[in-house]
Amino acid sequence: DTEVTQTPKHLVMGMTNKKSLKCEQHMGHRAMYWYKQKAKKPPELMFVYSYEKLSINESVPSRFSPECPNSSLLNLHLHALQPEDSALYLCASSIRTDTGELFFGEGSRLTVL
Amino acid sequence: QKEVEQNSGPLSVPEGAIASLNCTYSDRGSQSFFWYRQYSGKSPELIMSIYSNGDKEDGRFTAQLNKASQYVSLLIRDSQPSDSATYLCAVKSSGGSNYKLTFGKGTLLTVNP
């Protein structure tokens, strides 16, 4: 299994909603990442988990809250988002954090109304 | 500020031609270099990694690295319309921020039948 699975693929939410994005991998990777990508821009790193511990938060607003329940799962909890948070949210995994060989999921396209 | 520069394109080549994509980076201590392909509306996919000076070939793809010039390139031989995508150059930082993969802005390649 060489896939990173993300759900949902599309999400529309209001600014007062609470929702979650989910990511799963069964490749035994110990590093997992959340990226945000706007149209015609490169992916922008948000969070890095290494061995299920949050190792990097790239100064992301607290309305985004990551969680890593186990080595295969990564969640991104969303609350009180702004319309400018609308983007493609990409989960990725790698064997460890010291490699740049990332496997990306298909992404969750988020629209905030 | 560690930077990765790419010509944003679009780069347009006829089917069967060689497409040449270029990338320069600012961090002289960078050790690992990657090319990701991203189709419109899809997530990035790793197509090449290169770690030492010289050429690395994989099928129709050749990555070239020149650390002295801080330059990495991707050649696509016998370009096909299915190669039409945005190609992201990514560089792995050295030292304390070894978790971070810095992406260039991407080059949009169009292969015309």
Image (cartoon, rainbow, N blue to C red):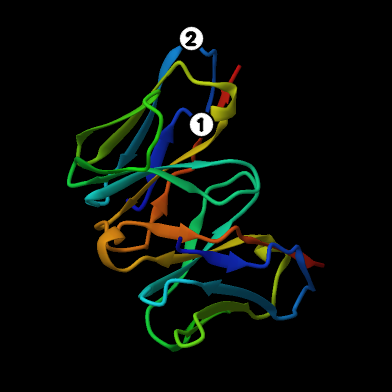
Which residue is identified by label 2?
A: A16
Q: Nearer the viewer, residue A63 or A52?
A: A63
Q: Position of residue B34 (x, y in %)?
A: 45, 68
Q: Position of residue B81 (x, y in %)?
A: 73, 64
Residue at 51% across, 31% down: A9
Which residue is identified by label 1?
A: A9
Q: CA distance from mark 1 to mark 2?
A: 21 Å
Q: Is residue A3 visible?
A: yes
Residue B8 is left or right of residue B94, and the answer is: right
In the depicted structure, whether residue A73 falls above or below residue B26: above
Q: Is residue B59 visible?
A: no
* Residue type at tag 1: Lys
Q: Earlier in the sequence, mark 1 or mark 2?
A: 1
Q: Nearer the viewer, residue A72 or B29?
A: B29
Q: Secondary structure at mark 1?
A: loop
Which corner quadrant of the image does residue B101 belong to?
bottom left
